[in-house]
Amino acid sequence: MKAWAALSLRGRLFVLALLPLLASLALIAFAVHHQENELARREHALVRDSYLEARRTELKHYVDLAVSTVRPLVGQPDGQARALQLLSSLDYGPDGYFFVYALNGRVLMHSRQPELMGQNLWELRDPLGRPTIQQLIAQARAGGGYVEYLWRKPSSDALAPKLGYVVAVPEWDLMLGTGLYLDGIEATMDELERGAREQITTTLLWVGGVAVFGVALISAGALAINLSEHRSAEAKLRALARQVVRSQEDERARLARELHDGVSQTLVSTKLLMESAQSDPAGAAAPRLLELALQRLNGSLVEVRRLSHGLRPALLDTLGLPAALQHLAGEFDAAGGTRFEARVRGLEQELPDAVKTALFRIAQEALNNAARHARASHVMLTLAFGRDGGLLLEAADDGCGFDAEAVQAAADQGLGLRSMRERALALGALLQIDTAPGQGCRLAVQLRPADIARAA
């Protein structure tokens, strides 16, 4: 929270622009990861099912071939022995062979593991506790079919998953079958899974690269905008500083002229009159000279009051903002040419000094701009007190208007507008400007009750 508060407005805007991008990329990465995992799982299942289906068909074909081979020997005196000898010679690869069991579990023929010959494996169980031979014989008694079980692989002498197909030969009371080891398909599935994981990782790296590129692009854009705005702000600040210094010097020069040409000359004249009256205290001209000196002093007081009113009107402190605005409009109206009016709406309320001063200066600048540039016939200054405690100051004229954006963009123009805008921002409000060339101008400052309370 402290870090967020320490960020500048541009920093906050940059973060707010960056977060949706990162969130979108994270959601895209999650969706891609989920979809690719789902596709990999489906591909895994499809390949496994296809492989097993092909192996099932192959096993059934082998067993059918073996049965058709030994079927002619059924019923012959030594048919079973010849059949077992014939089946032991059949194979298809290093781990493809036939086996024959009696239906009670005794091994009759096992070409790859002859040490099992004659043993009864009815109670044989795999590491998972499943009765292997019992499952095979039960499937054979049921008419034949497929059984998955674990069996020792001859080529590696290790337990491996195996798919077997068995049938019963009831004439000889035995089970004939063969099987294929499934460790090859498991290796293939592992390879497919590794490939899928690598593909998912590659995709996520691409998403991460896009994210980094997007962040870099936004950062570069923000930096370029920041530098451009910084240069523009520096130019405006330098122009404003020059204008402030020039305004200060102009104001000092004006005050110096007013004091020298007005107050100073009047005081010198008063001094001479009083010296003349003092030199002839019993003369008949002394009363008249003192009366003239008194008139000159009264004139000096009026001049000093006028100068102090220009610096800060006393009405603002004594009678409040509405009276000061009406007096200000009356002064502009007295200059002639353009009609200036001021009106107050709503129930007047006590305002903080900061609010009164800022609004008075904004109104003063607005009326001064209207008098100098608007070429208007009528200017209306409105101060409206809201029922909710808010406040609205509005200055509207029917003059020539102007292009507000162009004026604000120029570094050496619009200093008065910027001054008004900054005074409004200091109160927590915004200066609204509604104008266009040939359409007059309306300036408004809206203060909420919270803004007024904060300025107190």
Image: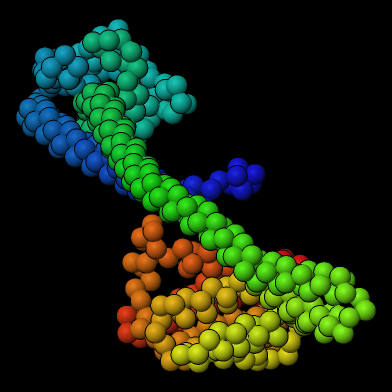
Q: Is residue 211 above or below residue 152?
A: below
| Left or right, 112 with reference to 424 | left
Position in image of residue 235 (x %, y %): 40, 50
> Residue most toward the right?
282
| Left or right, 72 with reference to 246 | left
Residue in the picture at 57% in, 75% down: 364
| Left or right, 305 with reference to 97 | right
Q: Is residue 397 above or below residue 65?
A: below
Residue in the picture at 81% in, 72% down: 276
Decide which of 145, 210 is in the foreground and name it: 210
Decide which of 327, 266 is in the foreground and name it: 266
Position in image of residue 258 (x %, y %): 62, 68
Q: How is the image coloured?
A: rainbow
Q: Is residue 306 above or below residue 108?
A: below
Residue in the picture at 82% in, 69% down: 275
Q: Is residue 450 in view from this perspective?
A: no
Quadrant containing the C terminus is bottom right
Position in image of residue 254 (x %, y %): 57, 65
Decide which of 218, 131 is in the foreground and name it: 218
Q: Is residue 260 in view from this perspective?
A: yes
Q: Quadrant of residue 51?
A: top left
> Residue most toward the top?
115
Residue in the picture at 53% in, 64% down: 419
Q: Is residue 438 above or below residue 445?
A: below
Position in image of residue 308 (x %, y %): 70, 70
| Left or right, 245 with reference to 270 | left
